[in-house]
Each structure stands twice: as structure tokens, then as C-alpha cells.
Image: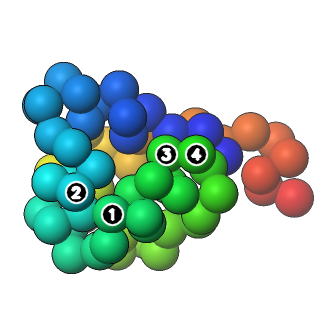
Amino acid sequence: MKTRIKELRARYDLTQEDLANKVGVRRETIGFLEKGKYNPSLKLAYKVAKTLETTIDELFIFEETDLE
């Protein structure tokens, strides 16, 4: 799964730590999300999307292999 978290985070001048604090996770979790190494819960995906003023669909890019 690919994400636009890093791109949108930069738009709001947020560090990984800043975003992590806003959504209630560790900085490492944001790093793993940005690298596509962690699939978030729906609740976390919603919090990140809301914080970055976007939708889950715009934030996370699913590929066919992700859905199998």
C-alpha cells in the first residue's frame, strides 16, 4: 500500500512526531505508515486523514495486490 502521508504532512509543515502526537501514536508508527510497512486500523486511518484534512481514499493508494 502506498500513502501520501509524507506529502500531505509537508504541506502542513508537520514532522512525523507532530503528526504522531496529534493522532495518538508513536513517531515510528507514522514512519511505518509512510513506508507502507504498516496497515492502519480504520480508526487510525480516519484520524490521520482528518488531521491532514483529506479523505482516507486520497491518503492511501491501494493496489490490486493489496486487496488479495
> What's under tag 1, amino acid-wise?
Arg
In front of the other: label 1 or label 3?
Answer: 1
Mark closest to the chain's N terminus, 1 or 2: 2
Label 2 Cα neighbours within 10 Å, binned few <14 / some 14-19 / many ≥20: some
Mark closest to the chain's N terminus, 2 or 3: 2
**Does dot 4 land on a helix, a strand or a loop?**
loop
Quick check: can you spot residue 59?
yes
* Picture coordinates of residue 21, whole percent (x, y): 15, 67
**Does dot 1 land on a helix, a strand or a loop?**
helix
Q: CA distance from mark 1 to mark 2?
A: 5 Å
The residue that mark 1 highlights is: 27
**Does dot 3 land on a helix, a strand or a loop?**
helix
Q: Residue at x 45, y 53 (%)?
A: 31
The quarter of the image holding the C terminus is bottom right
Q: Residue at x 78, y 55 (%)?
A: 67
The residue that mark 2 highlights is: 17
- Compared with residue 27, is residue 67 higher up or lower down, i.e. above or below? above
The residue that mark 3 highlights is: 34
The reply to whether discs 3 and 4 touch (Cβ–Cβ < 8 Å) is yes
Q: CA distance from mark 1 to mark 4?
A: 13 Å
Mark closest to the chain's N terminus, 1 or 4: 1
> What's under tag 3, amino acid-wise?
Glu
The residue that mark 4 highlights is: 35
> What's under tag 2, amino acid-wise?
Glu
Label 1 Cα neighbours within 10 Å, binned few <14 / some 14-19 / many ≥20: some
In front of the other: label 2 or label 3?
Answer: 2
> What's under tag 4, amino acid-wise?
Lys
Position of 61 with respect to 11 (left or right) is right
Q: Residue at x 16, y 40 (%)?
A: 14
